[in-house]
Amino acid sequence: MTAVAETIVTPGQMTRATTEPRWVRWILVAIALGFLLLVVIIPLVLIFQQAFEKGWHVYLAALTESDARSAIKLTLLVAAIAVPLNGVFGLVAAWAVTKFRFRGKNILVTLIDLPIAVSPVISGMIFVLLFGLHGWMGPWLQDHDLKIIFAVPGIVMATTFITFPFVARELIPLMEEQGTEEEEAALVLGASGWQTFRRITLPNIKWGLLYGLILCNARAMGEFGAVSVVSGHIRGATNTIPLQVEILYNEYSFSAAFALATLLAFLAIATLVLKSIIEWKSARVGAGEATSDRTIR
Amino acid sequence: MKRVIPGFGLSLGLTMSYLSLIVLIPLSTLFIKTASLTWSGFWDIVTAPRVLAAFKVSLGCAAVAALINAVLGLLVAWVLVRYKFPGRRLVDAIVDLPFALPTAVAGIALTTLYSQNGWLGRYLEPMGIKVAFAPLGIIVALTFIGLPFVVRTVQPVLEDLEAEAEEASASLGANRWQTFRRVVFPHLVPPLLTGFAMAFARGIGEYGSVVFISGNMPMKTEIVPLLIVTKLEQFDYAGATALATAALVLSFVLLLVINLLQYWAGHRHRGDVRVIPPSRSDLAVPVESPA
């Protein structure tokens, strides 16, 4: 379509009635890019500049120092528990919500989304109220020598709470769109429920599922507010990477703080790159869904 | 009628159990704890001068940041959908960075940037513009955090807009600005309001990116989430609970408003505009397509 339009009206000769004059377009693009440069790109560049300011040796030393190593290990451990858990239950929840009709479905979807609307600080606080020393189960836990708050289990719980919706909310619109015909056909032809899920549903949703897991992982590793409330900031024991970054920064060890921060920045960049790849892949899978050709030159 | 697809009881049962265990039971402790306060006790806590000041800072800065994002986010979405320029796809991907970058990392980066010796702070401070450790810093942090919300709600609506209406408007003699204002913009009002409300709600609860840059001075740059943390650290559970409940009720009201806006949008332009096409769901934007 654009190609046809271009043979009739080459850009620059005259302005089409449904676009803006060239100078207006360039000014708008310049303002938008300037805004993004100021708000997003400069801060991102600064993270790497600060981290490498004192050279590779300082950078590597900051990453291999023992508190940093234990923070990295704890972050990986927390993500390794929270992400698969939320992945499986996100899948189950999406199955329940999209493959069946039942009363109260909208309420269920709203409840699944709930953790997104709750401030991270409050998300951590509810676990302190429940398991903290002065909390409901605090005395009982103490009697049995169990520690949840200011310990690893609390961090895992708060992270699981925060990242609960990510897989489900990625899958629900996707599976809603795909409907149930393919599954019904498979079942009528004699496939078992599990076969249907594995051979029909899973291949259809694999990109969405992967994307949900990646998002869930990015949030799990980077969560700060909720984890900060339940962790107790014990060095080498209950500090995740973001908490260790905070401590180093508040101690004016800026290079070390930014060095650890680059790990999370790399994770964020990798997440965005994977997101772009997945969007591209799933756009190709859903071929025929022509992308908007209304881009005006 | 017998259901063809198996696993209804199993999947719904598992979902409900997991949801209750991870989300509902923990969250309900907050309300049960609040219920143990007397009404006057609750009222005294949330109307204390320091608390009111914190709410003022949180709400004010979040509103300003959401407004900045509404205006410039609309522009970014417009430019991304309507114009072709080098690096457009990269810019499109970068819009999501605030979702993917952990808030603490954003916090220390912005603070370093705008502090006295920072890349930007060193030019702004001599001009008398103090960003770090001032309310302006909170606005900067919340603008960063809220950026994707408006862009990602407006963008799909703009993509789905039919060219015919604009062509008709132009052929009937309207100039470009009139066409934008009278034909295009009305379609963008619902997603703009939704994006604004989401950025605003996120801004009120935001903690990680703000605590570093705000300076945390009581009565001046102390935000509500920080005050909750402070009360928790002092084992003032009653105070923290009351504040958390007030903040939570506020964000639920906003959530309700968002849903009403989407309902309104769905009915006003039924058939010609979808708020979010299911194929284009983005990083963590809490939007459901209108029923």
Image: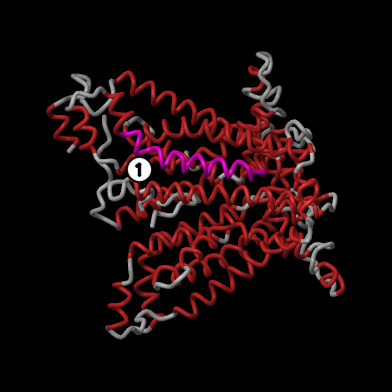
What is the image's colouring? secondary structure
The extreme top residue here reads B127
In the image, is A109 to the left or to the right of B107? left
Seen at 72% across and 38% down, the residue is B54
Q: Nearer the viewer, residue B58 or A95?
A: B58
Q: Which residue is mark 1?
A: B157
Q: Give the side of residue B232 with respect to residue B262, left or right.
A: right
Task: Determine if residue A57 is in view.
Answer: no
**Rendered residue at 85%/49% (across/down):** B234
Q: Where is residue B253 drawn, in percent x and y?
A: 57, 49
Furthest residue to the front?
Answer: B40
Closer to the camera, B131 or B33?
A: B33
Residue positioned 63% across, 51% down in the render: B249
Q: Amino acid at mark 1?
A: Val
Task: Please give left or right for residue A283 compared with residue A222 in the image.
Answer: left
| Residue B272 drawn above or below residue A113 | above
Residue B206 magenta: yes
Q: Nearer the viewer, residue B188 or A290?
A: B188
- Identified at 27% across, 43% down, the residue is A292
Looking at the picture, tell me which residue is in the foreground, B40 or B205: B40
Q: Residue furthest right?
A: A143
The quarter in which the C terminus of chain B is drawn is bottom left
Q: Position of residue B216 (x, y in %)?
A: 76, 35
- Tell me residue B87's x, y (percent): 38, 33
Count of residue discs: 1
Is residue B289 one of those drawn in magenta? Answer: no
Q: What is the span of residues highlighted in magenta in the rendered image?
A: B184-207
Q: Position of residue A210 (x, y in %)?
A: 46, 60
Within-10-Å neighbours for mark 1: few <14, some 14–19, many 20+: many
Residue B39, by quadrant, is bottom right
Q: Chain of mark 1?
A: B
